[in-house]
Image (cartoon, rainbow, N blue to C red):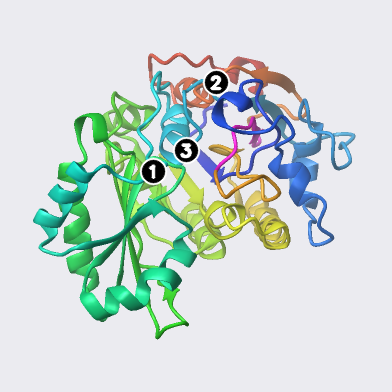
Amino acid sequence: MIINRVFLLVLDSFGIGAEPDAGEFGDAASVNTLTSVATSDKFSVPNLKKLGLFNIEGVTVGEKDGAPSASFARLRESSKGKDTTIGHWEIAGLVSDKPLPTYPDGFPPEVIEKLEAAFGRKVLCNKPYSGTQVIQDYGREHMETGALIVYTSADSVLQIAAHEDVVPVEQLYDYCRKARSIMTGEHSVGRIIARPFVGVYPNFERTPRRHDYSMEPPGETILDLLKMSGNSVVSVGKINDIFAGKGISRHIAIENNIDGMNKMLSEVDRDFFGLCFVNLVDFDMKYGHRRDVEGYAQALTDFDKQLGELLGKLKRNDVLIITADHGCDPRGAGTDHTREYVPMLIYGEGVKPGIDLGTRETFADIAATISKIMRIPYKTPGKSFWDEVKNG
């Protein structure tokens, strides 16, 4: 069977257990996003169960399905990191040997001086911080002085928060573009993130007008090869930001997970050939980092309901791949991502059901498999599993 379209769906931060080197990344051997979320009575994912989520090697929660409708694997991250950018790059075929820079003590004075000179404004905070807490702690001073709230996290990011009444959103975006031009060389952080907010102290809240300015991937990804070969590469959610627009034919912004799934469902109805690459960020941003087990569980339950609709709409020549980019255990210490294996479920009429692909050594096996499915040669450290699961 000839496959015309691949729908690649990333459940941002949905890890399934610590990798052997988790300790090197500051994580306990017990970190496990799935296991933590499964403790909630709000957790109900019958469609993921039917696909084979609980049949994956190393998964010890949930009930295995007797006849899973998808084939499945556990993927290990081989890149030196546990952040969104590196995780997605690896899914798309690039393995990163060096971690992107992080700033547990804030950015050095020489960086802050360059930022303030470029902005024409002073900088507040300059520490790792929760995005919701930082506007509570610094938002009032920002509104009184006009200084920008610059902060980071355990990820390789520089984030700039500003109230929309003080700094119009387009101006905030311009500041982020200036910061992107400054953060180069040894300070090439994965992402510069605009974080606009609104409200009156103490009731500030972030708006959906976040925008990411990412480093360009350091090499060709499967997205580039697909686009160059005349296929459509449709990004839904923050995929376009993560890849700095490289290899993307068309970008669709979303407001939240539910909107993202609705946009994906609309893409299934469109007539195109190629890849639809989707990121659902709420799991990570709203629940993982905030260590909200109940919220994470409810979000997965809501997703699973829409997943049922998606499975019913896929066409005969479509393939669906569901995976994640890292973990973010809501019962883990701190607020950081966690170094975890991720699930891989592959489904469609052209896919054999119930094939256990075991544990794979890199997320890049997905890129290698898409290369084989779409009949486009691509050199990557990953190894395709398409021959093992294809029907006919």
Sooner in the amino-acid sequence: mark 1 or mark 3: 3
Decide: is 59 above or below 207. above
Question: Is 241 or 322 nearer to us in this picture?
Answer: 241
Residue identifier under label 1: 105
Magenta span includes 290:
no
Residue identifier under label 3: 83
Question: Is 119 or 230 nearer to us in this picture?
Answer: 119
The magenta segment: 337-349
Residue identifier under label 2: 362
Q: Residue 161's spot in the image, x, y percent?
A: 32, 64
Tell me which residue sits at (13%, 60%) in the image: 119
Sooner in the amino-acid sequence: mark 3 or mark 2: 3
Q: Nearer the viewer, mark 3 or mark 2?
A: 3
- Mark 2 neighbour class, 10 Å CA radius: few under 14, some 14 to 19, many 20 or more: many
- SS for callout 2: loop
Q: Residue 318's spot in the image, x, y percent?
A: 55, 39
> Looking at the rendering, which quadrant does residue 51 occupy?
top right
Q: Residue 140's spot in the image, x, y percent?
A: 35, 78
